[in-house]
Image (cartoon, rainbow, N blue to C red):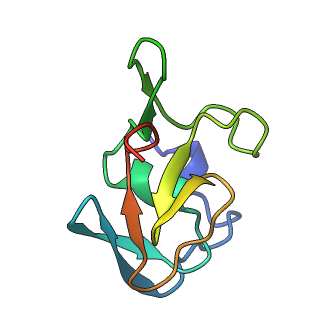
Amino acid sequence: MRNKLSGSTLPEWQRSRSIQIQVDGKAIEAFEGETVAAALLASGIHTFRLSRKYQEPRGLYCGMGICYECLVTVNGTHAVQACLTPVAEGMQVETCREWEL
């Protein structure tokens, strides 16, 4: 049985140039043009921060900058929205640090 989505009518999809970013001290692959949130999710990282009161995991929720659930630390800057921030070569991302600072 042929997959309906694999027909020749679909455009070919290619990712842009591969780059590396550091997440909690570990190098992960990301692609130019994608957001920090996309890179984290693609690498299997789903917890971006912990809630203040109960220390419950938070991650990508709205994906468009309204909810502020995806806050991370980027290159030392605290409370950056991962869903709106594009990746850059050598970027340093830290998760779950918002209440340590």
State the residue lying farthest toward the top: 54
Query: What residue is rendered at 37% in x and 41% in y?
Result: 100
User: Which quarter of the rendered picture does the N terminus lie within?
Assistant: top left
Q: Is residue 25 left or right of residue 56?
A: left
Q: Vertically, is 51 above or below 71?
A: above
Q: Quadrant of residue 89?
A: bottom left
Q: Position of residue 27 (x, y in %)?
A: 24, 71
Q: Position of residue 79 (x, y in %)?
A: 58, 50
State the residue lying farthest toward the left: 26
Q: Position of residue 20 (x, y in %)?
A: 34, 80
Q: Vertically, is 96 above or below 28?
A: above
Q: Is residue 79 left or right of residue 25?
A: right
Q: Vertically, is 96 above or below 89?
A: above
Taking depth in this image into account, of 96 and 14 the one nearest to the observer is 96
Badge count:
0
Taking depth in this image into account, of 81 and 7 the one nearest to the observer is 81
Query: Is residue 78 visible to the viewer in this orientation of the structure?
Result: yes
Query: What residue is rendered at 48% in x and 76% in y?
Result: 31
Q: Quadrant of residue 90?
A: bottom left
Q: Is residue 9 left or right of residue 7?
A: right
Query: What residue is rendered at 58% in x and 68% in y?
Result: 34
State the residue lying farthest toward the front: 101
Query: Is residue 81 visible to the viewer in this orientation of the structure?
Result: no
Q: Position of residue 75 (x, y in %)?
A: 46, 72
Q: Vertically, is 62 above or below 7?
A: above
